[in-house]
Amino acid sequence: MGEQVVTHSGWVKNVDDQGKVEISVIVKSSCASCEISGSCSLSDMKEKIIEVNQSQTEELKSGQPVTIIMKQSLGTWAVLLGYVFPLIVLVTGLFIFVGTGIDQGLSAIFAIALLVPYYLILYLAKDFIRKRFTYTVRPE
């Protein structure tokens, strides 16, 4: 049984001389595809730019339609790194600070301040993370 993948259609926005390809993907909430989305304010569409190395792809040209493929497990890791782990740091820090007898308001500020080193570590590890989060591009 093969690994499950997530696919998105997009188009090549830019190809530079260093081998970086920018691919534009339109991400829609489920409301955006609804027939009555114009009558409510919940519809949401955003353009996301994804960078891919040219060495991982065939020759791509600007404006060419492509399909981006990513392993579903990488999406799970993205959610863990972006939401779950920071929440654990925040709640754990809050319990520790309140447990040591610090005022609740000050404990909340200290717990939020704990997120600064967390995100700094993520920022410093961005090259390592970028190597792990790879996309496959298939021309349409």
Image (tube, helix red, strand yellow):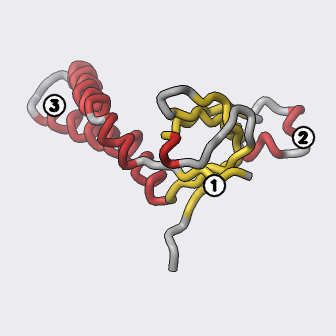
The residue that appears at 40% across and 39% down in the rendered structure is 82
- Assign a secondary structure to mark 1: strand
The residue that appears at 82% across and 45% down in the rendered structure is 33
Q: Give the distance between the C-alpha atoms of the residues marked 2 and 1, in whole angstroms.
A: 26 Å
- In front of the other: 14 or 71: 14
Q: Amino acid at mark 1?
A: Thr
Going from N to C along the chain, the mark reached first, 1 or 3, is 1
- Assign a secondary structure to mark 3: helix
Residue of label 1: 7
Residue of label 3: 97
Q: Amino acid at mark 3?
A: Phe
Going from N to C along the chain, the mark reached first, 2 or 1, is 1
Give the quarter of the image for residue 110: top left
Residue 88 point in image, percent of width and height: 29, 43
Going from N to C along the chain, the mark reached first, 3 or 2, is 2
Residue of label 2: 36
- In front of the other: 78 or 95: 78
- Of all residues, the one furthest to the bottom in this rendering is 1
Q: Tell me, for residue 73, which label it has, or none.
A: none
Q: Amino acid at mark 2?
A: Ile
